[in-house]
Structures are given as C-alpha cells and as structure tokens.
Image (cartoon, grey):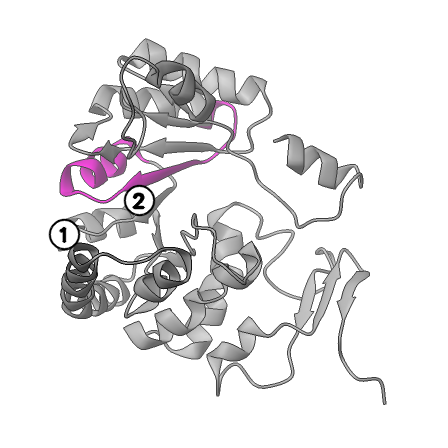
Amino acid sequence: MALRDAINEEMVPGPRVLASCRKLTPPGGQAVRLNHAVAEPILEQEFLQVSSADEARKAVREDLFYGADLIKVVADADNRFVAPQEMKAIVEEAHRSGVKVAVHATSVTGIQTAVDAGVDSIEHGDDVTDEQLKAMHDKGIFFDLTQTFYGSRLRNLLEKSIVLSPELKQELEAYQKGQSQVAPALIQRVLKSGVKYAIGSDMWFSYPGKTRGQATAIMFDAMRELGLSPIDIVRASTINAAELIGWQDKVGVIEPGKYADIIAISGDPLQDITELERVRFVMKGGAVVKNEVEKK
C-alpha cells in the first residue's frame, strides 16, 4: 500500500498498483513452516487470520482502513480452510464497501467455498470440477490462470538459485510429468466452460538475472504451450484482466477516455508470443517511461 501511494504521488517511478494489504487466511497463514514459539509476530506481518464470521468482517475492515483496493483471501492452505460462513462474511463486507474479493483456492473444498460465497475471482483453481466451472460461469466469477511454471520453467528457475539435491530433482521431475497431463486438460476445460478468465504470473520467486517484470513475462510462452492461442493470451492479460480488477473503464484497450498506458515490441506477438518478453517502449499515462525503439 505504501509503495502504491508513493508511485501515485510520483515519489518513486513504478506501475499502477492495486494493493490488497494483508491476506485473510485460516489460522496459521499460508504455506509457512515456522517455529510455533516465534511464529505469531511473523504471521501478523503478512496475514490477517480469521476463525469466525466476526473476525472475518473485522479483518476486511482493517485492510480497508489501511487503504486496500481489494481483499485477497487464502481459502485453503495445507489442509486448513476458511469456513463457508467466514467467506460469506468477507464477501458481504467487501462488497458493501465496493471492493472486489480475489481468492487463492486450489482444492475442491476451497473453490466451492469461494463460489458459494460469490467471490469475484479465483486464482489457481487446480482441482476445479466441471460443475464448479459452470457455477463460476453462471455467477460471472473470473478464473485467473497461473500456470507460469509449466514444463521445465520451475526447475530452470531453481537451478539458477540453489544446488538441487537428488531428492528435489526427483520431485521436480514428478511434478513436471504430472503437470504435462493435468495442466493442458485444465486449460481446455476452462475454455470449453465459457467461464471468464485472465492470466496471472504467480511470480513470487526472486528470479536470478531478471527483474520481477521480466520474470513475470515468462508466463506468456507457458500459456502458449498449454494450448491458449496468442490472441487469447493477449486478451487475457489486457482486456480480460482489466475487467477482472474492475478497471475496464481505465485500461485494457487503447481508446479515447482511458489511460494512455501503452507498450511496444519489435515483432508480432501473434506469430511469436515471446516478443512480449522483449518490451522496447513503455508509456504510462501519456508519459514515455522507456524508449529503446530506433528513431528513423
């Protein structure tokens, strides 16, 4: 939130940011392995833990007090779940204030809790069923596809960061083999369902040799390998993404009345989607931020 405000006040350069502040989670936060004797102060920096509907409402109000643009919820983490009544309270409180609710959900249970509560988007959705996709379609809930590490991408990243043990190499090989069947099938089911979708990077790693933006851009080719057409990838990351965050009146297309946020590349992304990894020109709000295009 502080970074967003600093960018908006032109204290530092940066992109447009919608900040969710601390994530709402089941007790214990998300995917953490901490010594219980010292865990609580660390968890409090990252998460707002909820164990009842009243705590859920209070957590939403606290994030909004600190300036959250949206509410982010972790529906499931290590077999711990936000309860249905808690999720409903979160959505009711957030929507009352006119902000959207984005939910990390990978399991059938977590996804169902989010769908039943009427959230605005579901991130990841690994184990989503066809019945849940239909319900998402009927309710207008967005599916945020995040298979950035498809193929050997996760292993490539880790090899740049650490020395892989034989055990970890085996785990990565098993993960890659499993994803080679599961992930493309998920994409096809999402497309067949007609549910609204966007793509996100889920790039929470530090990627050696790349800025966060450069690391994020590897998602485009991953989505191509998974079966999305180049035009659908472009739409999912612009027009669709703008609608997901509720900014369709501001960004996503180039037309009068919207922010003049424009990038340029040298080649045709419909022929080679990896061109989007090599941005040559950036304009934000009509001001040129980067220009590597040769002047003729």
Asked whether residue 149 appears in the rendered view, the answer is no
Q: Quarter of the image containing the N terminus?
A: top right
Q: Residue at x 29, y 62 (%)?
A: 194
Q: What element does badge 2 sit on?
A: helix
Outermost right residue: 296
Local crowd size for mark 2, using a 10 Å CA cut-off: few (<14), some (14–19), many (≥20):
some
Q: Which residue is mark 1?
A: 129
Q: Nearer the viewer, residue 29 or 92?
A: 29
Residue 219 image offset from top left, x and y in percent:
42, 65
| Residue 169 - label | none
Q: Residue at x 29, y 72 (%)?
A: 226
Local crowd size for mark 1, using a 10 Å CA cut-off: few (<14), some (14–19), many (≥20):
some
Above or below, comparing residue 3 to residue 127 in the picture: above
Specify the amino acid type for callout 1: Thr
Specify the amino acid type for callout 2: Lys
Instruction: Work out how far the residue at label 2 is from the one at label 1, CA to CA, in angstroms.
Output: 15 Å
Asked whether residue 268 appears in the rendered view, the answer is yes
| Residue 139 - label | 2
Q: Nearer the viewer, residue 16 or 43?
A: 43
Outermost top residue: 54
